[in-house]
Amino acid sequence: MKIKREYMELGALATLALVLLVAFPLLLGGFYLNLAGKYLSFAFVAIGIVLTWGYGGILSLGQGIFFGLGGYALAMFLKIEASGSNLPDFMIWSGIKVMPAWWAPFSNIYITLAAIVLIPATMAFVFSYLVFKKRVSGVYFAIVTLALALTFTVLLVGQQSYTGGENGITNFTTFLGYDIYSHASTYAIYYTEIVLLLFVAMGSTAVIRSRLGNVVIAIRDREDRVRFSGYNTAAIKAFIFMLGALFASIGGAFFTIQAGLISPTVVGVTSSIEMVVYAAVGGRLSVPGAVLGALVVGFLQFYLSNNFPHIWLFFLGALFILVVTAMPNGLMGLLDRFALSRE
Amino acid sequence: MELMQGQQGVIFDGANVPAARRGHCELSIRNLSVSFDGFKAVDDLSLHIAQDELRVIIGPNGAGKTTLLDMICGKTRPMAGQIFLNDLNLTNLSDFNIVRAGVGRKFQNPSVYEDLSVAENLEISIPRGRGALASLFFRRTKVVKEEIRDMARIVFLDDLLDRRAGHLSHGQKQWLEIGMLLMQAPKLLLLDEPVAGMSPREREQTAELLKVLSVGRSVVVIEHDMDFVRSIAHTVTVLHQGRLLVEGSADEVQADPRVIDVYLGH
């Protein structure tokens, strides 16, 4: 049964690769491809949530923070490029005369890419290690991350002259000289994103199957006991949390370039909770499920908000309640049960 | 240590390996005390357990037996006194570092990882690969698989390697947990009621197992079943109200009027 499940998971990953790399670019026009790319940026976060929450039992309601760190890092780079020799427009409006020292490094693409990887990973590891060492977990951890997400948003809105405030950072033009809104760029960005997404998905599957994956499951079920198997469980949990943060940050960067903006709304509390919903809908124990969840919920939101602009959020709430009560393992869990019952 | 090398059949030859080759180990507990809300669970207790010794601790409920093991393995912090494994002071080490120093603890209720298979339970107990990266890149080599199969054979679970631990019987879970401890290659083994919930036949098998695995290390067992105690113990320590009451062979202890008064007589 276990072997069979592994094959199913591999099959689902292969199907996903085929759909995302071949079917979508062929069938969807530029507009919808860009939209799919935008929703798939949340798939990175959702995969991280499968690792941390599904396998590790660590529920974070603040993944938007890490999504935001990646998103804002790339947005700063794009904004500096779009502004040419001038300061970014929102800084000028706020009366800032010189480029702030911590903005300047983001004119360099390598520093920006390094920041997208290193800043969230370091912050996530250090923060969560200190918290886990104090043996804070479960609901308490979720509340701490929720509070941090809230603080992060307040900070972004409050520091308007450095962050663009409520509006965030937008009006990009080019990336390394290429027009980011051209037809060719849409495809180039999309393919880059999918290749990275598949890389993250396969990497996560490998993590789950490794001995570390088993240790993480053991920690979820019996953390006390795992310490008596000689593991520093705080460090293991922090490592998994760091992976989740890293994936979220990569997703955030892709969101910025796909959507052409990053703002406090996108990285706030509501958005952070929605990210958990993606993983729950797809199946919190399934990596392909996380990608499926991000796509399904994303397009559903798009469809519903266009057709029922006033009440669409209720549909989303109903969907979450339905998933949690009727299918605890999400869409992939449903598929799983269906396939296994046919033996 | 030879027990852990994973060569086939080594464990039951273990008794023939000279103890000196396995590294010396002895536990000494000096004036240990702890109290909870004013209640003295363990009170100025000193104990010495030698290499190759299998010590059984008995005593009425609330005598401080489990608390003593909790303090040795770092689950509870003593308020006074010290615990040494050879020259290493365990008193202020964190729980996982005490494990890394060579102390294995089996809890009263069998504590295995129910969502994992028997083989996976044994695998994550292998000492090398306890860091995040080390466990991520841990390779399931032939040697590792052989090691797991050997251990499963020792604890009578070789037919059940792929069984989910949650689906094992109570006695099998106890064996699995003992196997997980042995995987850690401990110098000191602490077993809290290892035969609880076992059938008479399983008890016999476990008694044989404990005799073999005490060679080359020190073993402390908490047990209530006096027949089982007689079948395994070298020395029996009787605790009462957190203090040492009597120490001696199983026969001496059972005949001691003080022991009969506080424990066996009831």
Image (cartoon, rainbow, N blue to C red):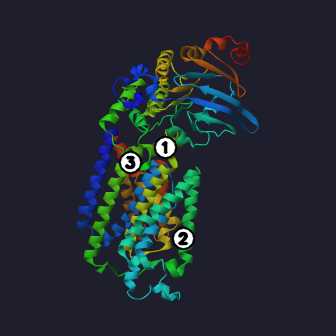
User: In what element is the residue under mark 3?
Assistant: helix
The image shows residue B249 at horizontal and vertical percentages of: 61, 14
In this figure, which residue is indicated by the disc labeled 2? A153
Q: Does residue A175 lie above or below A227 as drawn? A: below
Residue that label 1 marks: A231
Residue A27 seen in the current view? yes
Q: Is residue A136 visible?
A: no
Q: Quick one: which residue is furthest to the right in this view?
A: B38
Badges 1 and 3: C-beta atoms under 8 Å apart? no
The amino acid on which the numbered mark 1 sits, given as a three-letter code, is: Tyr
Query: What chain is tagged by disc 2?
Result: A
- Residue tagged 3: B136
Query: Which percent across, then down, holds residue B25?
Result: 52, 29
Circles 2, 1 touching at the beta carbon (< 8 Å): no
Nearest-to-viewer mark from 2 and 1: 1
Give the image quarter of residue A210. top left
Q: Secondary structure at mark 1?
A: loop
Tell me the SS state at disc 2.
helix
Q: Is residue B200 left or right of residue B226?
A: left
Q: In terms of depth relative to the viewer, which is nearer, A301 or A271?
A: A271
